[in-house]
Image: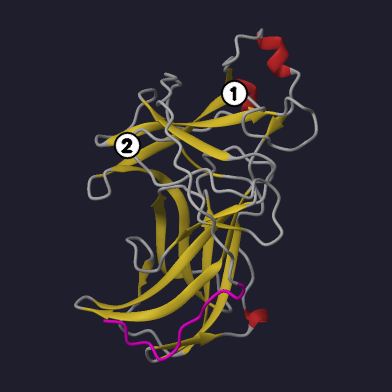
Amino acid sequence: MRISGGVIGLAGALGATAGLIVVVPAVDEGRGRGTREGLAAERLHDAAGAEPHRHRARAPLRPNLRSLPAENVHIESTADGRQLRFASALANIGIGPLEVRPNNGGICPPRQRHAAQVIYGDRAGDGRFRRGKDGILATSPAGCMLDHPTHKHWHFDAMARYALTKSETSTPIASQEKVSFCLRDSRRTPAGPGPTRRHYGDCGRNRVQGISPGWTDVYRADLPGQALKLPDELADGQYCLHAVADPLGLLTETDEGDNAAVRSIRITGNDVRPGDRVACTVQ
């Protein structure tokens, strides 16, 4: 039962285009444990039959993940107490797609599957990703994927971390350390680069997941994991809602230092309103 008197949304509606579902066979890399080893240790993939040195000459088209400030923030009452619910969005502002494929390599816990991140190479040398022209340059181990039996597909583990703090401290009042995502193109970023059509669509057990350059993956507030349990004694006041993409650093990006975002909120009872912007800083 939603009982908040106020709801916060992120300004600026972004249009979504018709979805294009991409079905690609799973890649079996056998690439060791689920930790990132960096491009220097990656095994080159020669999908076109070219010699490995030709791939090394192409510059990698890496993604760059960035969390956007939480949207649709509100309080919900449950049998276990109050929850702060919110939607989150992961934007890819890099020059290459974020793409992960489930495979049988690596060592993962039961009911999980190893994930491989795919890095494309800039075949044209123009610094832009062109699907169908830029081939696979390398793959990198990227942790594990969770079996989601209800959704009948795999979720990329540790895609985000959420925390609520008081405006003047960095100590979490409530937190979610690892939140899994099914990665897809949900909507375009404002004036973002990349394709105008959605490429990564609905997830399946053996489908490639990803976020195209210039696209954002949005997880609605009513989905599992999109809530923080509030302490019963939480006082009214101003708080900071933090979100961090790829908190364990499992994915290769062009910039590892810009993954976080924060939204300032003011809680009064079960009412959530925008807070003072200068009161919260990105952690």
Q: What residue type is labelled 1?
A: Ala
Q: Is the magenta stretch mostly helix, strand or loop?
A: loop
Residue beneath the point at 53% across and 43% down = 199
Residue beneath the point at 63% across and 27% down = 39
Question: Which percent across, then down, holds residue 28?
Answer: 41, 20
Relative to 255, residue 259 above or below: below
Per the rendered image, the range of residues in magenta is 1-12
Residue 185 inside the magenta-drawn segment: no
- Disc 2 crowd rating (10 Å Cα; few below 14, some 14-19, many 20+) is some
Question: Which percent across, then down, holds residue 233?
Answer: 33, 85
Residue beneath the point at 46% across and 57% down = 161
**Residue 193 located left or right of residue 26:** right
Question: Which percent across, then down, holds residue 50?
Answer: 65, 9
Relative to 200, residue 57 above or below: above
Precedes in sequence: disc 2 or disc 1: 1
Q: How far apart are marks 2 and 1 (CA)?
A: 22 Å
Looking at the rendered image, the quarter that the N terminus falls into is bottom left
Residue 5 inside the magenta-drawn segment: yes
Name the residue at the front extreme. Answer: 18
Residue beneath the point at 54% across and 48% down = 198
Which quadrant would residue 82 be assigned to in this image?
bottom left
Colouring style: secondary structure
**Residue 232 located left or right of residue 208:** left
Q: Residue 138 carries which label?
A: 1
User: Toward the viewer: 175 or 57?
Assistant: 57
Q: Which mark is residue 8?
A: none
Q: Is mark 1 on a helix, strand or loop?
A: strand
Which quadrant would residue 203 be assigned to in this image?
top left
Q: Which residue position holds label 2?
A: 205
User: Toward the viewer: 264 or 61?
Assistant: 61
**Residue 150 located left or right of residue 254:** left
Question: Which percent across, then down, holds residue 230?
Answer: 35, 77
